Image (cartoon, rainbow, N blue to C red):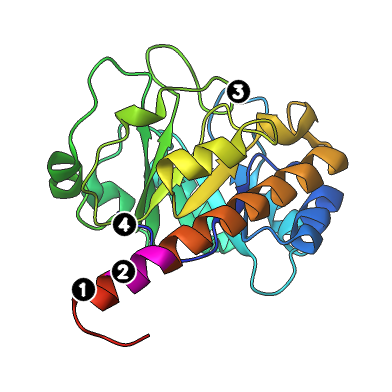
């Protein structure tokens, strides 16, 4: 997807405490994620996520992160938590993902040996609102803090791209300049321990994203001006 906007969206994932949810909102995060995947050290139950959701500020999205949960459990999460988005990390197909009346993001595991190209992904998941690229796969779970080669992200996607996997304040600036994503998704990179967020790391991460946006925006403006000039349009 071509980058045409000036602001990278930020999602803080793996929330387990209401105070961290509140701080994420105050720092300017666009979304927070609650993990319902079995086996995750950040897993919460629907009732816990519902209580934490009350700490969200207006205009901040709640995202339910799932991995091969059964349909009844997903429906319970939707009913209790009222997420804005569902984020699927397992082997779910498009019909399953779109079957709950909530827009969904499909996570693609870049730890897998083979990753489908852009056309194949969009054919396989036509209803996906976005694709999230993470390092999970081949025995590595999401939220591990492990990165992947950003050049492996398929080019030519028409849906928004969200970058995850091994990013933190130390490298998100470079990640944004290299991939120009719609958004970035961080969990372990802002933690003191699994599920326990570190306020200073959260703040530093946001600052680095905004610093990257300040570098990207002039390049976009220059490119737009060049294209306009080539087409005889005055700017």
Residue at image mark 2: 226
Residue at image mark 3: 145
Residue at image mark 1: 230
Inter-mark Cα distance, 2 to 1: 6 Å
Give me the residue at 20% from left, 83% from top: 232
Front: mark 3 or 4: 4
* Circle 2/circle 3 CB separation < 8 Å: no
Inter-mark Cα distance, 2 to 3: 39 Å
Label 2 residue SS: helix
Residue 169 within the magenta-colored segment of the rendering? no
Task: Decide whether the magenta segment is chiefly helix, strand or loop.
Answer: helix
Front residue (pair 60, 208): 208
Instruction: State which tag comes first along the sequence, 4 or 1.
Output: 4
Front residue (pair 228, 70): 228
Query: Looking at the image, is 209 positioned above or below residue 89?
Result: below
* Circle 2/circle 1 CB separation < 8 Å: yes
Instruction: State which tag comes first along the sequence, 2 or 3.
Output: 3
Front residue (pair 45, 64): 64
Q: Which mark is residue 79?
A: none
Residue at image mark 4: 2
Give me the residue at 57% from left, 54% from top: 215
The quarter of the image holding the N terminus is bottom left
Side of 6 relative to 41 (left or right): left
**Magenta-tinted stretch:** 222-226
Q: Residues within 10 Å of mark 2 (few under 14, many from 20)?
A: some
């Amino acid at each position: 997807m071509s980058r045409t906007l000036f602001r990278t969206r930020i999602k803080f994932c793996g929330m387990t405490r209401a105070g961290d949810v509140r701080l994420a909102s105050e720092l300017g995060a666009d979304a927070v994620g609650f993990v319902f995947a079995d086996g995750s050290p950040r897993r919460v139950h629907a009732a816990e996520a519902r209580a934490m959701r009350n700490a969200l500020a207006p205009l901040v999205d709640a995202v339910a992160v799932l991995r091969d949960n059964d349909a009844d459990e997903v429906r319970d999460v939707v009913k209790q938590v009222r997420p804005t988005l569902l984020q699927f990390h397992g082997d779910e197909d498009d019909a399953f993902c779109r079957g709950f009346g909530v827009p969904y993001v499909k996570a693609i595991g870049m730890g897998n040996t083979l990753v489908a190209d852009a056309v194949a992904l969009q054919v396989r998941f036509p209803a996906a609102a976005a694709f999230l690229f993470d390092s999970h796969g081949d025995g590595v779970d999401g939220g591990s803090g492990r990165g992947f080669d950003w050049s492996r992200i398929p080019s030519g996607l028409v849906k928004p791209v969200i970058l995850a996997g091994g990013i933190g304040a130390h490298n998100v600036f470079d990640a944004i300049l290299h991939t120009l994503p719609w958004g970035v998704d961080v969990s372990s990179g802002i933690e003191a321990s699994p599920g326990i967020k570190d306020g200073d790391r959260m703040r530093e991460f946001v600052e680095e994203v905004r610093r990257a946006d300040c570098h990207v925006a002039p390049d976009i403006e220059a490119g737009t001006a060049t294209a306009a000039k080539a087409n005889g349009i005055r700017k």
